[in-house]
Image: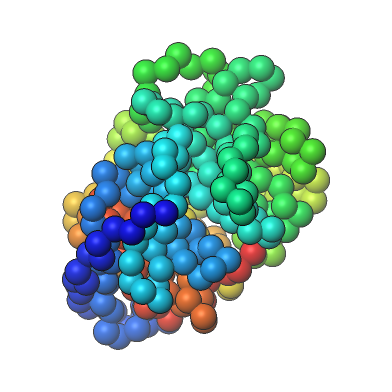
Amino acid sequence: MRPIAMFAFLAFAFPVHADELIFFPTSVKLEKLWGEGAFTEGPCLGPDGCIYFSDIGNQIMKYDPATNKTSVFRAPSGRANGLKFDKAGRLLACEGASSGGNRRVSMTQKDGTVKTLADAFMGKKFNSPNDLTLDAKGRVYFTDPRYLGSEKLELEQQSVYRIDADGTVTRIITEVQKPNGILISPDQKTLYVADSNSDPKEKRRLVAFQLKGDGSVGPMKQLFDFGADRGIDGMTVTTDGHIVATAGREKTAGVSVFTPEGIKVAFLPTPEHPTNCCFAGKAMKTLYITAGKSLYRVETSMTGFVP
């Protein structure tokens, strides 16, 4: 890993309405921690307390809260986007399409060795794995849309898949036009998916599926419709089941908080278009946000769920 000069802290203060105090404290300060990326994405908490995130300029970065320094963790990254650590401390990554993209779900082991978990379904290469989540049994659920890349599409649909412990890949959701962010509720009973089409005339919504014990899902339920606004890119969840999501552009760009039923109850604007977020810190109340070329953090009144 090579160190990169620390980006000077910048604080952005925003007003908080009284009904939002259960989500954000009265004095909300959004800190800019690093801003030298090409396009940041996929933050996740590592077992060492550091924040790992993708710079889709083809590297995975590591921010250390103890030193306030950011370094390169893995390069090239295969155009990594969504990241998550499993219970064994191995980093799982959705590697996308376009130049340098591997179009696979990979695992970086503790010794730095990178292996492929899955790169195809029924012999056909994935479109562009985007984001992932894990259930309590260690099964991996990931979205496979296509936003960028001129590679020929081999799969006729942009779907959601599950990878089981034995490596079996199962297509579980086809009803979503362009699946992006994905997460599982703390009680393991609901799978949330962001349907985020790049065309404002198409679907931009938050949907939910009953998640069954065998990893299959029930019928789709629409929770929130973003209309022509930019829909959810990435999201995380609190211990009480609130969905914390990054969405919007320009004046609507920011972090929105939804109830499990899809009611929007809080909003925090961001100075750049947000892409994803994760909770970290000793009390799991610090929210880290990737947006534009940068990494931000903000203290919240919420408690992030630890899978």
Residue drawn at x 27%, y 84% is 27
Which x, y percent locates residue 269? 26, 64
Picture coordinates of residue 84 (x, y %)?
55, 53
Which quadrant holds the N terminus?
bottom left
Tell me if 152 is positioned left or right of 47 in this view. left
Q: Position of residue 200 (x, y in %)?
A: 30, 35
58 versus 289 height, above or below: above
Residue 99 image position (x, y, % from top left): 36, 25
From the viewer's perspective, is residue 48 above or below residue 4?
below
Apparent side of residue 277 relative to residue 242 in the rendered image (left or right): left
Q: Residue at x 32, y 31 (%)?
A: 199
Looking at this view, is 54 or 26 the one in front? 54
Query: Is residue 30 toward the left or the right of residue 236 in the image?
Result: left
- 121, above or below 116, in the image: above
- At horizontal 64% and vertical 64% (from top left) the residue drawn is 307
Q: Which colour assignment does the render follow?
A: rainbow
Q: Is residue 158 visible?
A: no
Residue 138 in view here: yes
Image point (58%, 66%), residue name = 47
Residue nearest the observer in this picture, 38 or 3: 3
Count of numbered circles in the view: 0
Question: Which quarter of the figure has residue 142?
Answer: top right
